[in-house]
Amino acid sequence: MSFSVLGDLNWLAVIVATIVYFGLGGLWYAEFLFGKAWQKAMGWDGNAPEGAGAGIYVVPLATCFVATLATAMLAAASGTDTVGEGIVLAIVVGIGLSAAILAVTGMFDSTKPAAMTSVAISAGYHFVGLLLASIILAVWR
């Protein structure tokens, strides 16, 4: 694989998949889904950190874009173009990378009241977000 694959991407699909992934976060971390449990696990009172400003939205959007772009590059390089192949790609990037990395971080994070609960909620979000993104990217080539 090389960076020349960037020229082969459907950039509209990358943008839409990024927005879907980011938008899922708004639902996933809402109080009526996992928001309360996640806040409790993090030891967070729900107030935005001081000085967060627009960064509280811009940084997650940027990271969703980076993850979606990397997934799009892998999809293009591997010829992923069906829903089934998109699901396999999501398992590889969502569980094989995102969840694995989060689990290591959570295992050694003694600052959170329930670090592994936080990891489970976050890993679930990234898996479902990358699943939706992978399917969008696979079928909209």
Image: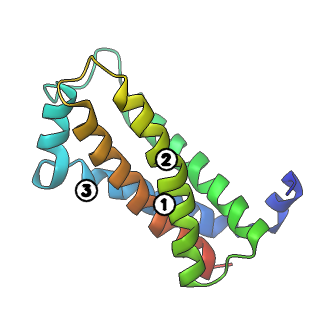
In the image, residue 64 sits, relative to residue 136, either above or below, namely above
Q: Earlier in the sequence, mark 2 or mark 1?
A: 2
Q: Secondary structure at mark 3?
A: helix
- Split into 4 quadrants, where in the image is the C terminus? bottom right
Q: Is residue 134 found left or right of 1 in the rendered image?
A: left
Tell me the residue that label 3 is attached to: 27
Give residue 111's position: percent from left, percent from top: 26, 17
Q: Position of residue 33 (x, y in %)?
A: 15, 55
Of badges 1 and 3, nearer the viewer stands: 1
> On the image, which quarter does residue 139 sit in?
bottom right
Q: Which residue is mark 1?
A: 130
User: What crowding class fits label 3: few (fewer than 14 Cα within 10 Å), some (14-19), or many (20 or more)?
Assistant: some
Nearer to us: label 2 or label 1: 2
| Residue 79 in the image, given as x and y percentages of width and height | 75, 76
- On the question of residue 66 being in view, the answer is yes
**Mark nearer the viewer, 3 or 2:** 2
125 lies above or below 45: below
- N-terminal-most mark, 3 or 2: 3
Compare residues 54 and 29 and report the one nearer the observer. Answer: 29
Residue 19 rendering spot, x and y as whole percentages:
47, 58
